[in-house]
Image (tube, rainbow, N blue to C red):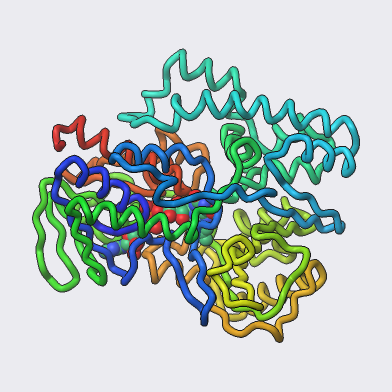
Amino acid sequence: MVGAGFGGLAIALRLSHLGHQVTILEKTDQVGGRNRSLKVNECTFDVGPTLLMMLDPFQKLFSDVGEKFEEHLPITLCDPNYRTFLSDGNRINCTTNVAQMIRQIEKLSGPEDAAAYPKMLGKLAELYHASMPAFVRRNYNSPLDLATPAAASLALKHGMLGNLAKGMEGFFKDPRLQMLFCIQTMYLGLSPYDAPWVYAVLVYMEYGEGIWYPKGGLSEISRVVAKLAEARGTEIRLNTSVSKVGSKHVILESGERLEADAVICNADLPYAEDALIEAISKHPASSKRHSCSSYTLYIDYEGELPGMLHHNIVMGANFQENLDQIFHKAQIPDDPAFYLAASCLTDSTKAPAGHLNLQILIPCPNLDHPWTDQDSEVLKHRVFARLEKEVGFDKSKIRGMAEWTPHEWQSELNLSRGATFGLSHDFMQSACFRPSNKSATVPGLYFVGASTVPGNGLPMVLISAELAEERLRRDGCL
Ligand SMILES: Cc1cc2nc3c(=O)[nH]c(=O)nc-3n(C[C@H](O)[C@H](O)[C@H](O)COP(=O)(O)OP(=O)(O)OC[C@H]3O[C@@H](n4cnc5c(N)ncnc54)[C@H](O)[C@@H]3O)c2cc1C
């Protein structure tokens, strides 16, 4: 196995539970990949994921190996999910509590939009339950797999291929609500203005099922899965970089060659195609489209910031222009929307008393834009100024700070072009069009993780491990 990211750990746990000998080769000194932790002074952060959503794949991984997810990782519902700061000064506590949402929407934009909210939620629940088994939790052998009357009628019935941002206009007349209920595709690094309606399932995951916090943080899930895999015989070799992947073998940077019945690559697929795989790919990564990146700040902040919750989203005045700059113009946004968190507000072990572990994630272009130090300074200045206005942020109270620009995402974790969410989820790289978990050119080589099927996000990556196991079984490897 190349890489101890979340997908690699999950498939290793699955295979070692079945009695197979698994060796994981991980270039860094930690397990988890994007889902690992980082320290700044005495503050601890989850490097990437902070929102635990869609519990079912987590519970399934654990139950498939005879364990209980909540016994290892007790979870708390974040209520509200998060607070949204609109540019006009309004604040919305986004919650799974339907009555509270209706009340807030009525106050913001009147009874018509308030009445539309439960209607939208009902429609999205149907969409979610229809699309998961039909399009997400399944392997594909060819794009023709979806060219069936059943798939076409399901897609038509739910309008799955319509435009997401336009679809929200059909529910709400207030543009602030249209925006509120389509920002979720940014979790995939995809603009809702370019996304098909089927991705509205993310809105249902949030408002229907909720956002959770596992004890110890999201990166703790990586550590627990790694421990369970090791207890079943998986060997994890940290600080071990792979330089080439071939048919049933890998070559380490040290020159050592390791043989295996099958090689599973968890290193991000476009990077692997460009840099690791010996045979020429039929569809090189250079011909694929990448998600956006994130400029991420991890701050030890001494003091309080009343007004913010554990999770917060701060919106600029023109979301569409913000995304146009990121996705189509490869520019630093003038008025960036961003995510702000302090997990210590739920889990006091994450920061010393009187401090906040402040995390700021600003969506930005991937390395199609040549990121410079000046870009970091400009964005920091814009975001700090907005936070000063919204929550009284004072930069003289920063006691330490780590910064991950697109360059760090690329150099630390080998994410091609620093694209933090892997390959883009546009229509032509979704479902049957997303790269398969089985190499077309190298016998015995499989993939798991965010850039193969079904896609990005921890729950999807867990499903990618389910699908990789199924593929290996079908090929007679298990
Ligand atoms: C900023 C950010 C915020 C996010 N927020 C959320 C969220 O709130 N909720 C959510 O569900 N998801 C979130 N995600 C998405 C989630 O983190 C990813 O989908 C998931 O972690 C990807 O896992 P993966 O299995 O693809 O592996 P990766 O995390 O890509 O891990 C791959 C591993 O391979 C290793 N590797 C690479 N090259 C080599 C090599 N040559 N030799 C050996 N090892 C190698 C890397 O070091 C890494 O450990 C977020 C992601 C980011 C970046």
In the image, is 416 to the left or to the right of 266? right
Image x and y of residue 139, in percent: 34, 31
Residue at screen point 73% across, 45% down: 180
User: On screen, 157 above or below 242?
Assistant: above
Give the quarter the ligand 1 occupies: bottom left
Residue at screen point 69% across, 84% down: 397
In the image, is 279 to the left or to the right of 107? left
User: On screen, 360 above or below 465?
Assistant: below
Residue at screen point 15% across, 59% down: 250
Residue at screen point 74% across, 45% down: 179
- Which residue is at the front of the view, 155 or 73? 73
Is residue 290 something one can see in this rendering? no
Q: Residue furthest front?
A: 71
Location of residue 30 (image quadrant): bottom left
Image x and y of residue 199, in percent: 57, 37
Q: Which quadrant is home to the C terminus?
A: top left
User: On screen, 401 above or below 228?
Assistant: below
In the image, is 271 to the left or to the right of 459? left
Image x and y of residue 322, in percent: 70, 57
Q: How many marks?
A: 0
Location of residue 446 (image quadrant): top left
Q: Which quadrant is home to the N terminus?
A: bottom left
Location of residue 391 (image quadrant): bottom right
